[in-house]
Amino acid sequence: MTRTRRRISRSAGAIVLLACVAAAVVLVTGRHLGRTGDERDAASASAGAVTVVADAVRAAISVAGQSSPGDLGVSASAAISKGVSESVLTQARDSGQPVLDDTVSAIVVARYRTDEVPPTVQDRRDLVVGYRVVALDLGSTLNRLMPSGGGISVSGPDRRIQSIPAAGPGSAASFTTSLGPALPAGWTVTVWVAPTRMPLIAWLLAAMLIVIGLGVAVWVAVRQGDARQHRDQLRGLQQASATVAAVATQAQHSLDLGEVLPAVATELSHVFDLQGLSLSTPTLHGERPIFVLGLDPDPAEPPAARDEVAPGGTLALVLSRGGRIAATLRVKAGRRLHADDVRTLTAAADVLTSALANAEVFSQQAELIRRMRSVDELKTVFLATASHELRTPVVALAGYANLLYSSWDSLAPDAARSHAERIDRIAQRLNILVEDILDFSRLQSGRGPAADDAVLDLGEAVGLVLQEQSDIAPNHDLRYHPGSDLPVSGSRQAIERVVTNLVGNAAKYSDAGSVILVSTRRVDGHAELVVEDEGPGIPADQREQVFSPFYRGSGDEVVRTRGAGLGLAIVAEFAATMSGRARVEDAASGGASFVVSYPIVAEDRAIETGGIHVQA
């Protein structure tokens, strides 16, 4: 009996011991799970807080860097007396940028004698007048982000900058995240949460496990499996948050898609083991690829909601903003992409959408600035050219007129007639220059010839101009080869200005007595006016520029002649009023061949010929 009792006692003790061990395991596991949950909560809070804190720090730096009239800051010695190190003052002075100083928890900005930051380091050292030291206060931001019962702090490379509450995490579960590459290295955010109390159910289960040891062991195994699952979920959440944060950092690093897209694509390919990635934009005729990395994913894969993607498969994601499709992102999987991977890729695609929108806005603003600068430069060149070209004939007119006035009684009739002829020629040249300037000004301001949809025969219209202005090139052999059946829509004034300017240009740059050949022809549904000369021609690298305002090219022939560089620009503008286009080619004679191409109008419209309308 005693032996049996001992045996039962030993068995009971063993059962009790096993139950106690199982209960201890349960209590340890409960504490471990609580700690794991605390770490997960701290990591989640840290991932959500890092972007907000980084934005607040960047905003504080931006505000500190804004200059105020008359604000010269404090001297270097005064700043040092406040605790600012000399190295920080030197960095702020030489860089011209706000500098974070974690020693005094402040932003240091150099002030100069000039309104703008001097362009060179030496200029900044010579012109510095003081320093502005602005305290870095993140209290409101940290108060908003602080988890209930826990705390949050921001630290620099050497010390803690600000903490709410003042005490650190101690033994509480905490998670530290870097503020990112956009800020100085070593700046971090730490979030901690209040320790979770041991759940009551753990105590109840421990008591039950003393009675039912085997059940407790099974329950512990199940709980351990749950713990592993929670840890896996936590790692997945951390990876997803880190991936999205990295993509966001790359996207915010630049407004140039040429820098953003390779960086983002490389990050995604590395994290998800992608075989390839492509980005395409929608067009009227399908999609136009704008970026490809690695193997080109299947371009025919339509965007669709998917939970998983097999290795080698393609996932297509639509990048849309404001109801408008900006682009389509396609990835070629190198491994199986699970639901968490697909969700993370979708979040990264949303960040990339914002980057595309920002780049588009930046590009539009840059183009607007470029156009404004071009207009300003055109105005400056116009005023300089006009004043220079007008001054010479005006001085010559005044000189010959004064000579006639002062020597009228003593001049011989032939000499007086010669002076008068020179005055007449100068006045005609001055009149042509003034007409060119006025024409160009009216065309540039949109006040060109009134819209006229009358149908003219180009060959007859050009012939009338050459007939009425037979002295347009008096020192040259002017020939005309008219074409027939060339109906165009426009005004006679526009055709006349094009013909006179092209013929005058040919006469100016070709030798006296040389042939100037004018012809009209039909080519591929267009009516073309061609003016060929026997001059030196125009080099191929200058042919796109000759129709630009005030451009006169180079060469001896250009140097020997005068002009404002407006004749060919006016040709291009008047041609455009009739939907025409001007170009220059090589002539068969070796000179230049100017071609103005107009669209042929419908055959059933009336053609205006010498005031009489006939049906084409």
Image: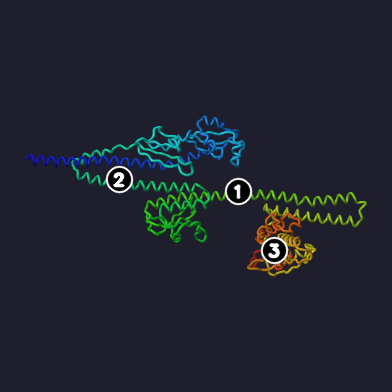
Q: Is residue 138 left or right of residue 214?
A: right
Q: Amino acid at mark 2?
A: Ala
For label 1, the crowd category at 10 Å Cα-Cα, with few meaning under 14, some 14 to 19 and many 20 or more, is few
Classify 10 Å Cα crowding around label 3: few (below 14), some (14-19), many (20 and above).
many
State if disc 3 and disc 1 touch (CB < 8 Å).
no
- Disc 3 marks a residue whose amino acid type is Phe
Q: Where residue 594 is drawn, which disc sits there?
A: 3
Say left or right for 319 vs 36.
right
Please provide percent x and percent y for residue 369: 60, 48
For residue 241, say whether it is visible: yes
**Three-letter code for the amino acid on which mark 1 is drawn:** Ile
Give the secondary structure at mark 3.
strand
Q: Quadrant of the C terminus?
A: bottom right
Q: Which quadrant does the N terminus fall into? A: top left
Question: CA–CA distance between discs 3 and 2?
Answer: 83 Å
| Residue 615 in sight | no
Q: Nearer the viewer, mark 3 or mark 2?
A: 2
Residue 162: x and y in percent read 44, 34
Mark nearer the N terminus (1 vs 3): 1
Residue that label 2 marks: 227
Q: Between 84 and 467, which is closer to the camera in this rendering?
A: 84
Q: CA distance from mark 1 to mark 3?
A: 33 Å
Check disc 2: other Cα within 10 Å, few if <14, some if 14-19, many if 20+: some
Sooner in the amino-acid sequence: mark 3 or mark 2: 2
Q: Residue at x 25, y 41 (%)?
A: 26
